[in-house]
Amino acid sequence: MGILSLLIKMVLAFCAVNIYALSMVYLNGAMAVLAIIIGIFFVFALCAFPCRSKEGGRLGRMHRGSCLMKIFLADATAEIIGAVYFAVSGKWGITVTVNCIIAVILLALMFITAAVRIYTSSVQIGIKWRVLGVIFAFIPVINAAVLFKILRLTDNEYRTECDKLALDRSREQERVCATKYPILMVHGVFFRDVKALNYWGRIPQELEKNGAKIYYGCQQSADSVAGCAAELKAKIDEIVEREKCGKVNIIAHSKGGLDSRYAISMLGAGDRVASLTTVNTPHRGCQFADYLLNKVPESFKNGLADKYNAALKKLGDTKPDFMAAVTDLTASACEEMNKLCEDVQGVYYQSVGSRSVSAMGGRFPLNLSYHFVKYFDGPNDGLVSVESMKWGERFIFAEPKGKRGITHGDIIDLNRENIKDFDVREFYVKLVSQLKEKGI
């Protein structure tokens, strides 16, 4: 919505909210009643359709909520100023009292309508700002600051998503991600592939929009590299038989990259894999993991492992092994694996990496682990050092900008967060389109 259009609606809404006082002063009889009815009807109409939107659905609903909230903020501020003026000047009377009651009701309707639209449609305000919005809703000044932050997030989200949809429409016929072989996306440790909450965030949907055929690893969330690799080998065989495609392209995150390498090199999957792209994978392990395993008492480790394994069995894992998974991520274990798992000729290997700029750039627990990993392993993404991520013919580094960086979770869109100067979805579109250009 243009600034001029927004200003006009703010003025009209202010008049409609205060139509009772205006009618009592400037009109009388039937005209006053008619004006009041029209004013109230206008507010209801404004709540139903405050502005036009480029897109429908979720984005349109969010944009209309944002526009309505801006109108509410402007008119509520003017209303408060007016009420203070009448109270201080001694001009407060029955007309002002009745008008204020009506105004509060109409403004409340605008606020609730706008808030519901924003809360039910925005992705970027996340849980944090939703909770803060509720907690500080009735605390003056703070509530306004929170609302302004929410509006900035929703406006940026609207612009970003509209541009993304326009880009996808412009290249729809090109099918830039329609690779010769399907894509197998392999998750990392302590996660599972769940339909309701995709490990890879919005990335698979974006790839599919642009022609990609996507499958998932679905291996155990916590098991040894060899154990997970066996599951991946079975999954690769299943995909090849189903699609009659001969091979797959693997994109694997974190420990999933080690699982994939083992399946290719040690379990004979190499003849059915065209390429392996590892994403922030600890190919040389984590020295921090070695340190922890050596320092933590056996009783504590075993107790933690038992609790974790029991919990994961309830979530779907058939044979989780917490200690085996953690041990295989140590620098010493990865050194031994690298001696055994030689790259298979005919498979194109490349790797992706990123790093955090500071601990504040990551969410829990990455904001806690960042400094420990930095001390033992150097620059990192909150869990894995940059040097450990490098593998294959090509290393693609997602260079961070500003004070945030790109964390271990950001690189797979785990939090569905739009990061300034880094479009993770477009990053993967480019990655897969380059595989298409290679003819695989």
Image (cartoon, rainbow, N blue to C red):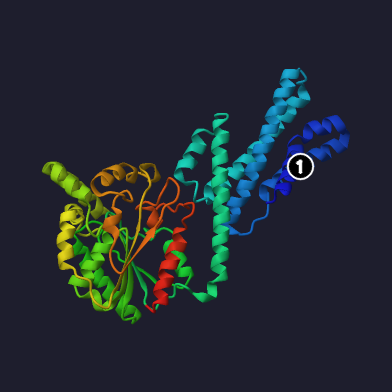
Residue 224 position by quadrant: bottom left
State the image coordinates of residue 290 (x, y, percent, origin top left). 17, 49
In this rendering, position of residue 426 left or right of residue 388: right
Q: Could you tell me which residue is drawn at 24 percent across and 72 percent down?
A: 234
Q: Is residue 306 visible?
A: no
Say above or below: 222 vs 266.
above
Query: Type of residue at label 1?
Result: Leu
| Image label count | 1
Q: Is residue 103 visible?
A: yes
Q: Residues within 10 Å of mark 1 (few under 14, many from 20)?
A: some
State the image coordinates of residue 397 (x, y, percent, origin top left). 37, 59
The residue tagged with tag 1: helix, strand or loop?
helix
Front residue of this view, candidates 421 and 316: 421
Say above or below: 431 vs 419.
below
Q: Could you tell me which residue is drawn at 70 percent across and 23 percent down?
A: 84
In this rendering, position of residue 215 left or right of residue 290: right
Q: Could you tell me which residue is drawn at 29 percent across and 44 percent down?
A: 369
Front residue of this view, candidates 305 and 188: 188
State the image coordinates of residue 343 (x, y, percent, origin top left). 22, 71
Name the residue tied to disc 1.
12
| Residue at the outermost left position | 298
The quadrant the C terminus occupies is bottom left
Say above or below: 154 vs 81.
below
Residue 283 position by quadrant: bottom left
Front residue of this view, candidates 100 and 429: 429
State the image coordinates of residue 177 (x, y, percent, origin top left). 44, 72
